[in-house]
């Protein structure tokens, strides 16, 4: 049974019933004053603090001439259930933390019950639910832009503008993070879980130290990174890879089907999609595809892919266990590598840029938000939950459970990072601070994000495996994506 | 009898009987199968992302598949490779193993269980185990090789080796075929063997002239279901390699899944599905037709 | 098993049969000693071969007893020391496996009963009765196996939604009672290996078709029936796609979902998922089926032979 605290309930019934009771008694009394005591029973509904029940009291009034003697007889009556709205939440992972957050939310909002369904969520489940007209109320960890662009997510601007708890402009939630979930001028999600700067270049200080490289002079351009990569990479006597400088596409495993398309254009200083137009077939793309090829060729693409495959399931793969010197990774990287290998030291900083942009510090904003489905019957309670996810309590629970950093600057300023060694804490906070300190903060709104990821996979793998030139890959990718986008936006369905 | 009451002829009574027995399936077909079949056929002529109503596009999806889709060709090629090599490999291996396990040895129950283990392990666990076996750094095989100064084998990261590596896992997991064949072997009349022993027939002749002919009905089953199943093989490539490296293991069903649930192109996926249906049907008809020549039913 | 006649369509008559039986007995005696040696050799060969098959399973169990760093050791460790049995109870705490086990049993048993009954019934119609249109209908049955699940899923989901069966086990159980094409096909093939003379004799005796099914066919096809019961139970046990889209209540989840939930635990700081725990959970999830197979294999492997003459 739910333990509902009644202490904050407002009961309007009480006053009304007492008023009626007194009125009736007065009427009866006025019908003729008799000296004999009259016993009048009235029912008064009262909430007794601390008990989960509504109490109905029988008030007996004895009227002896003009004196009313009121005796109270208390009758305990079971409360009728208060009006409770149930909302369904598909939070994705981490499940246990989300369930805990839901429980705390319920305690603070006794009129809302949250049904947490942890089905990861797979798109089959989401699509089936939408097709049947029974979507969840609020969900996360899905391809956000694709759902937004197809019009199934509720725009939140009105609610945000009238809310006292979230603001688009106060900067507590940084502006770029809001824009990640924006589309054609409207905002569709409140940034919350695991939202930060998305990429950081990590260096395993032990590995680079052993290679005789200077940790105080970390490379910032791709040319310098390649030099370091060559100095670090070593083979065993049989020619097998024993340690590698940098496996550029190794963050996503299996290393074959997708990678982050947005990172590379930002390093080269452009957006690959703007106002629904793709800009990929350009010299910068050819340049960075060739950088990827350069790294792959230096080691042999089969060895490279083998390494990524090999490291599936290990946090941060080879980088996490000291077999790799450098890696571009996510906000969860620093904590992850520290867990895999507490004896190794790491430093996370800005991602490399081409020599032509030397000195530029760049970051990309991204993350997760609680999205409310347009067909949800309970948008207001859902909105409350979405807001709650940004607040201290929820962020504390998440941080306690899995070490993720809450989205608000105010929360970040007060979080106790003492569970981590100071260098790890610094690395973790880099992903947040970089949003303020970078020269450029990028974000993308791509209505066919998933297709882009796959086309990107085709492009860079085709180049890595020598099946096509970088120019061909860039041209093909732009042509295919333009065609696909036209299909999605050109038709209304 | 109802049939007699309806004054059906002898043929009519037989049809009534046949329909009576197959009625549970017919009910299921009408309730659960017809609508998905028709719906998906309809969707194949539309552009449909499930989130919004479908839009008619006529034959555009099919045209795109045949004329412009390079991944379709790759996926189909990969799948045909898988079928042509994987299905016979599985069939022959499991048949031979079943015969092996049918012999009188010690610990027969245990040995049969061991061979069946792979097919009952949840796919998720099997995949993880095989990823470790094939792992190029510290896997079972390569850890041994590297530890002895030899070059590691890039099982799942080489475009040449990826498909054979997957086929090995598939054959390994064929325990259910072994079980089916074992059950079938029990039904081969013992007397035939004994008679042939007296005639001086060696093991090989007995195998070739008794065992195989007597089990052909079940061989047809394993062959046909293997064909139909392998064409739609999804879980193995999806969990093991996600279609890589560089589309080497992108099987048809994986590409279909991507279109349906990753790209939001359910209409296109439906067209792909019906194309696959036609391809499977053609292969099946060929196999079934040929079966008249090599399958021996004792009811005829 | 009443009513099964000892009709032996391939038997030889009378005296010849006896002399032939004596001859085969002599052949067997001569081979006595060689046989035992042969048996030993064969046993060793079989178990040596089986290593390839159960090795991954051993690897799984071995990993389940390691500590996390030991998993990445090169060269690979087979016997961890110390052996960490604690992984097993620990693995069981990530998700409520007890509840999930209960849930799984609830609908797996129902589904298996349904599949056995209906598939046998339908397969009879496709094999033991000659009727016009039989083969055409059978090809349609086969055809239903040829359309990939990805495009059938959502329309099927809509049907269950219309029936009001979402978030219950009904979508996972009720269709079993209408037969499964795969099992119907399998049973049809087995039924076709039973000589028609047995059915004909029973018909002459006045038995109804259902009577023949129950008294003649089912007993002879026990191995095949046991196989489909095992397979269906197994498929149900490991099924993850169905529960994923039909169940919206975590308390109803089956074991397969539990394993998936565990896999998604990989990011926890407080309780990080380690490979050994996942392997331990996988081993636990596999064990009931292994036991089921081990104890029931007699039924389908050493079932009744048609001729009843055992050497």
Image (tube, rainbow, N blue to C red):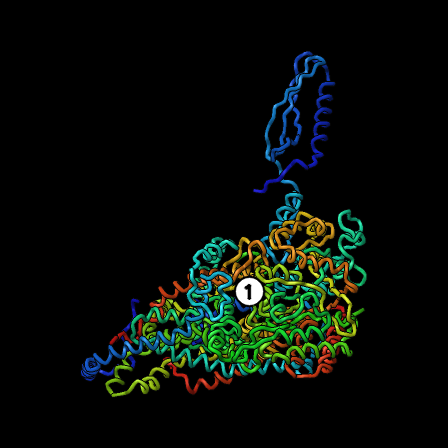
Relative placement, left or right, of A262 versus C27 is right
Point out residue B15 in the picture as x, y percentages from the top left corner.
Answer: 46, 74
Few, some or many C-alpha atoms within 10 Å of disc 1 (few <14, some 14-19, many ≥20)? Answer: some
The answer to whether B96 is drawn above or below residue A76 in the figure is below
The answer to whether B266 is drawn above or below residue C21 in the figure is above
Visible in this render: residue B200? yes
Identify residue for label 1. Answer: C241
| Picture quarter with the C terminus of chain B | bottom left
Visible in this render: residue C117? no
Relative placement, left or right, of C296 versus C105 is left
Give the quadrant of residue A279: bottom right
Give the quadrant of residue B105: bottom left
| Picture quarter with the N terminus of chain B | bottom left
Residue B27 or A172: which is nearer the viewer? A172
Point out residue A439 in the picture as x, y percentages from the top left corner.
Answer: 79, 64
Residue A46 or A28: which is nearer the viewer? A46
Relative placement, left or right, of C105 versus A11 is left
Asked which secondary structure carries label 1, the reply is: helix
Q: Residue at x 68, y 37 (%)?
A: A8
Residue A190 or B18: which is nearer the viewer? A190
Point out residue A438 in the picture as x, y percentages from the top left corner.
Answer: 77, 62
Number of numbered markers: 1
Residue A291 or A71: which is nearer the viewer? A291
Q: Residue at x 29, y 82 (%)?
A: B192
Q: Disc 1: which chain?
A: C
Point out residue A268 in the picture as x, y percentages from the top left corner.
Answer: 76, 72
């Amino acid at each position: 049974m739910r333990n509902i605290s009644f202490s904050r309930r407002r009961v309007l019934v009480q006053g009304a019933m007492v008023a009626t009771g007194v009125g009736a008694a007065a009427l009866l009394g006025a019908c003729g004053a008799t000296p004999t005591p009259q016993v009048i029973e009235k029912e008064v509904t009262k909430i007794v603090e601390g008990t989960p029940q509504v109490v109905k009291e029988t008030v007996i009034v004895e009227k002896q001439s003009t004196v009313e003697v009121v005796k109270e007889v208390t009758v305990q009556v079971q409360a009728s259930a208060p009006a409770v709205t149930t909302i369904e939440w598909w939070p994705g992972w981490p499940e246990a933390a989300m369930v805990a957050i839901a429980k705390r939310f319920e305690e603070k909002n006794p009129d809302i019950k949250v049904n947490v369904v942890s089905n990861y969520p797979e798109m089959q489940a989401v699509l089936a639910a939408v097709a049947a007209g029974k979507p969840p109320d609020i969900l996360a960890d899905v391809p956000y832009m694709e759902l937004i662009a197809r019009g199934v997510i509720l725009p939140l601007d009105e609610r945000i503008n009238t809310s006292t708890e979230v603001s688009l402009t106060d900067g507590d939630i940084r502006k770029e993070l809001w824009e990640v979930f924006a589309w054609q001028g409207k905002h569709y999600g409140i940034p919350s879980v695991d939202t930060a700067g998305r990429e950081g270049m990590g260096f395993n200080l032990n590995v680079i130290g052993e290679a005789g490289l200077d940790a105080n002079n970390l490379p910032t351009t791709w040319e310098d990174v390649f030099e370091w990569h060559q100095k670090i990479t070593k083979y065993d006597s049989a020619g097998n890879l024993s340690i590698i400088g940098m496996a550029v596409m190794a963050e996503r495993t299996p290393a074959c089907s997708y990678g982050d398309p947005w990172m590379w254009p930002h390093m080269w200083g452009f957006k690959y999609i703007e106002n629904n137009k793709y800009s990929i077939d350009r010299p910068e793309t050819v340049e960075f595809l060739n950088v990827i090829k350069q790294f792959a060729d230096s080691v042999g693409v089969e060895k490279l892919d083998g390494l990524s495959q090999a490291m599936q399931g290990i946090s941060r793969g080879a980088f996490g266990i000291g077999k790799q010197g450098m890696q571009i990774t996510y906000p969860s990287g620093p904590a992850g590598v520290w867990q895999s290998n507490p004896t190794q030291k790491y430093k996370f900083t800005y991602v490399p840029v081409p020599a032509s942009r030397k000195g530029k510090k760049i970051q990309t904003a991204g993350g997760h938000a609680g999205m409310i489905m347009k067909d949800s019957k309970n948008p207001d309670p859902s909105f409350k939950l979405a807001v709650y996810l940004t607040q201290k309590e929820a962020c504390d629970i998440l941080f306690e459970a899995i070490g993720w950093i809450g989205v608000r600057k105010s929360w970040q300023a007060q979080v106790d990072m003492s569970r981590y060694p100071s260098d790890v804490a610094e690395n973790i906070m880099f992903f947040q601070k970089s949003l303020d300190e970078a020269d450029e903060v990028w974000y993308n709104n791509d209505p066919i994000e998933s297709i882009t990821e796959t086309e990107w996979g085709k492009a860079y793998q085709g180049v890595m495996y020598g099946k096509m030139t970088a120019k061909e890959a860039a041209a093909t990718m732009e042509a295919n994506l333009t065609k696909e986008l036209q299909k999605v936006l050109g038709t209304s369905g | 009898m109802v049939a007699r009451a309806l004054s059906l002829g002898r043929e009519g009574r037989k049809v009534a009987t046949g329909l009576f027995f197959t009625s549970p399936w017919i009910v299921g077909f009408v309730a659960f199968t017809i609508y998905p079949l028709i719906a998906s056929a309809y969707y194949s002529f539309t552009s449909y992302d499930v989130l919004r109503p479908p839009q008619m596009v006529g034959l555009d999806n099919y045209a795109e598949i045949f004329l412009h889709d390079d991944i379709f060709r790759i996926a189909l090629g990969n799948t045909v490779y898988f079928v042509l090599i994987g299905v016979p490999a599985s069939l022959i291996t499991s048949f031979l193993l079943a015969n092996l396990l049918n012999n009188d040895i010690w610990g027969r129950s245990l040995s049969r269980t061991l061979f069946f283990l792979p097919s009952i392990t949840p796919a998720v666990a099997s995949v993880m185990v095989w990823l470790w076996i094939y792992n190029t750094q510290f896997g079972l095989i390569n850890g041994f090789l590297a530890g002895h100064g030899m070059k590691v084998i890039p099982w799942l990261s080489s475009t040449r080796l990826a498909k054979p590596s997957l086929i090995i896992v598939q054959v390994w997991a064929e325990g259910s075929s072994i079980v089916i064949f074992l059950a079938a072997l029990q039904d081969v009349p013992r007397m035939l063997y004994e008679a042939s022993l007296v005639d001086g027939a060696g093991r090989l002749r007995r195998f070739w002239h008794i065992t195989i002919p007597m089990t052909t009905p079940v061989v047809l089953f394993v062959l046909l279901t293997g064909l139909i199943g392998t064409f739609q093989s999804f879980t193995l490539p999806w969990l093991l390699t996600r279609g890589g490296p560089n589309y080497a293991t992108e099987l048809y069903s994986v590409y279909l899944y991507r279109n349906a649930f990753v790209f939001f192109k359910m209409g296109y996926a439906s067209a792909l599905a019906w194309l696959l249906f036609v391809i499977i049907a053609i292969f099946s008809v060929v196999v079934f037709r040929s079966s008249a020549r090599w399958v021996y039913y004792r009811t005829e | 098993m009443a009513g099964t006649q000892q009709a032996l369509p391939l038997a030889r008559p009378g005296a010849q049969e006896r002399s032939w039986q004596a001859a085969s007995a002599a052949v067997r005696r001569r081979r006595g000693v060689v046989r035992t040696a042969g048996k030993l050799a064969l046993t060793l060969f079989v178990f040596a071969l089986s290593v390839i098959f159960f090795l991954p399973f051993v690897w799984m169990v071995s990993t389940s007893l390691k500590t996390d760093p030991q998993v990445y050791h090169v060269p690979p460790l087979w016997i961890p020391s110390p052996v960490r049995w604690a992984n097993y109870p620990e693995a069981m705490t990530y998700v409520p496996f007890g509840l999930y086990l209960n849930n799984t049993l609830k609908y797996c048993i129902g589904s298996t009963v349904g599949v056995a009954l209906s598939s046998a019934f339908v397969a009879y119609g496709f094999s033991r009765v000659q009727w016009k249109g039989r083969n055409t209908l059978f090809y349609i049955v086969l055809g239903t196996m040829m359309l990939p699940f990805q495009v059938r899923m959502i329309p099927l989901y809509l049907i269950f939604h219309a029936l009001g069966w979402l978030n219950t086990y009904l979508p996972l159980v009720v269709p079993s009672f209408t037969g499964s094409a795969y099992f119907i096909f399998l049973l049809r093939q087995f039924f076709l290996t039973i000589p028609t003379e047995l059915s004909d004799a029973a018909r002459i005796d006045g038995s109804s078709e259902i009577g023949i099914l129950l008294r003649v066919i089912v007993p002879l096809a026990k191995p095949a029936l046991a196989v489909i019961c095992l397979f269906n139970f197994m498929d149900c046990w490991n099924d993850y796609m169905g529960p994923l889209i039909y169940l919206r209540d975590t308390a109803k989840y089956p074991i397969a979902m539990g394993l998936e939930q565990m896999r998604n635990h990989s990011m926890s700081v407080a309780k990080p998922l380690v490979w050994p725990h996942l392997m331990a959970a996988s081993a636990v999830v596999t064990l009931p089926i292994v036991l089921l197979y081990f104890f029931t294999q007699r039924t389908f492997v050493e079932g009744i032979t048609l001729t009843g003459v055992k050497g």
